[in-house]
Image (cartoon, rainbow, N blue to C red):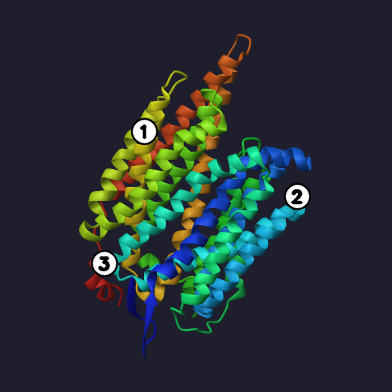
Amino acid sequence: MIEKIQVNQSNAQTVKVVPIMASLLICGFMGMFSETSLNMALSGLIKEFNISPATAQWVTTSYLLVLGILIPVSGIFIRRFRTKKIFIMGITFFILGLVIAATSSTFKVLLVGRIIQATGTGLLTPLLFNTVLVIFPPQKRGTAMGIVSLVMMFAPATGPIISGLVIQYFNWHLIFLIPIPLLMISLLLGLGHLIDLSREQKPRIDLISIVLSSLGFGGLVFGFSHAGEADVGWMSWEVLGSLLIGILAMIFFVLRQMTIKEPILNVRVFKQPMFVLGISLTVLSNMIIFSSNLLLPMYMQGGLGFSSAQAGLLLLPGGILNGIMAFINGRIFDKYGPRWLVIPGFMMGTIATLVFAHISSTTHSLTIIIFYTILMIGMSMITTPSQSNGLNQLDRSLYPDGSAIINTTIQTSGAIGTAIAVSILNANQHASLNQIREPLTSTLQVKSLIFGIQHAYLFTTIVAVIGLFCSLLIKRVLVEKVQQTIH
C-alpha cells in the first residue's frame, strides 16, 4: 500500500506505508512484550541474586518509571528532531539495553539494562502513534489504530506464555535475546523506508518544565506502582511522599505550560471535549484491564490451585481476541463512529466484572474463559474508538502532544487501577482473616483470598458503570469541521 502525504508545505513525498508501519509495530510489540515478560522470571531472579521480592520488583517498576518520565516530554523530541533520528536513537537504546540485561551477572547491571531499554521504548512508542496520525487521514485512522492495538495487545497476552516456556527450558537471560533479531529487522526497514514526517524545528527546551514533568509523572507512576505491592500499602512514607510530590509537581507543570511561550506539552488539547472524553474513557477501560490481568491470575492460582502456565493459557483466548477485535472495531469506527462501540463495550465490561465479583472456589474454568473474553472484547470496543475519535479533534500541530498524553495515561491509569484493586483485595482479605476464630487452614486462607478478590471486582464494576454513563456523552468528530472547531 503506497500513499502520498504532504509532509511539509512545499512538496509531497511517496510514503511506503507497509514497511514503515511494520518497522514501528515491531518496536511497539517488543516494548509491550518487554514490559510484561519478565514478571514470570521474578522468583528466579530472587534466588539467583539473593534479593528480596520488593527489590526484584524494581525490574518492572524501573521500566514503568522511565516510561512515565520520558513519554510526557516525547512531544518536544518529535518537534525538535527528525523522525528517522528519533527512530535510530530509540532502537539503539532498546537493543543496547537488551544486550546489557542479557549479559548481566549482577542485579544492578540488569537494572541498568532495563532502564536503557525503557528509554528506547519511551522514544519509539509515541513515535508510532504520531506516525499513524500523520500518514493516515482521519477517515482511515480508526483502522490504523486498530492495527496498532491488534499488534500491541498480542504482546501482553503472549509475553507471559513465551517467557514461561523460556524459563522452564532455558533461563531468563534468553528473554532479552529474543527481541534483538526482530529489532534488527525493524531497524533495516526503518533505515530503508522511514521518512521525516515533520519539519525539524528548534523549540526552546524549558528545563523547569522537564523537571516538573519528571517529578510529576514519575512520582505518580512510582507511588501507585509501589502502593500496589502487597507488603507496602498506601500508608508507607515512600508511597505518600511520591504521590504528594507527583500531584504538586503536576499542578505546577500544568500552570507553567499555560504561561510559557513554547510549552513542552501543549495543554490546549484539553480544550477539545471529545479528546478529554476519549482520554477519560481510555483511563477507565485501562483500569479495568490492568486490574483484571492482576486479579484473575491471583484467583486462579491462589483460589483454584492452577499453575501459572494453566492460568496464562486460560486467559490467552481473551487476550488474543482483544487484539483481533481492536482491528475489527477500528474499521467499524471508521464507518459508523464511536457511539455504537463504546456504549456496548462498557455494558459488556459491567456484566463481566459483575460476574467476577461473585466468583467462588467452585467457579468453573469455562466461566472464567467466557467472561474474561467478553470483558476483553468489550474493552477493545472502547480503547481504539475513544482514542481515535479524540485524536481526530486535534490539529496536526498538536499530534505529538496528543500522542504523548495518550501513552502517558495508559501507563498511569494501569498503575492506578492495579494499586487500588490490590489495596481493596488486601484490606478485605485481612478483614476476613481477622474474623476467623477457629484454627487457620488452607481452605480458610483460600476463602479469604476469594473474598478480597470479590470486593476488588466490585471496584472494577463501579468503574465500568461510571464509564457506561460517561460513554453516553460521546459524539463522532466530524473531520471536515475539525479545523473550524480548533481555530
Residue 2 in the image, given as x and y percentages of width and height? 34, 74
Tag 3 secondary structure: helix
Label 1 – label 3 distance at C-alpha: 32 Å
Q: Residue at x 21, y 59 (%)?
A: 335
379 to the left or right of 113: left
Between 178 and 421, the one lying in front of the other is 178
Q: Which numbered disc covers residue 326? A: none
- Circle nearer the N terminus (3, 2): 2
- Residue matched to label 3: 139
The image quarter containing residue 385 is bottom left
Residue 316 placed where, x, y %?
A: 45, 39
Q: Residue at x 70, y 55 (%)?
A: 101
Left or right for 477, reference 278: left
Q: CA distance from mark 1 to mark 2?
A: 39 Å
Q: Please tell me the numbered disc located at residue 107.
A: 2
In the image, 80 versus 280, the foreground residue is 80
Query: Given the image, on which type of amino acid does mark 2 rest?
Result: Phe
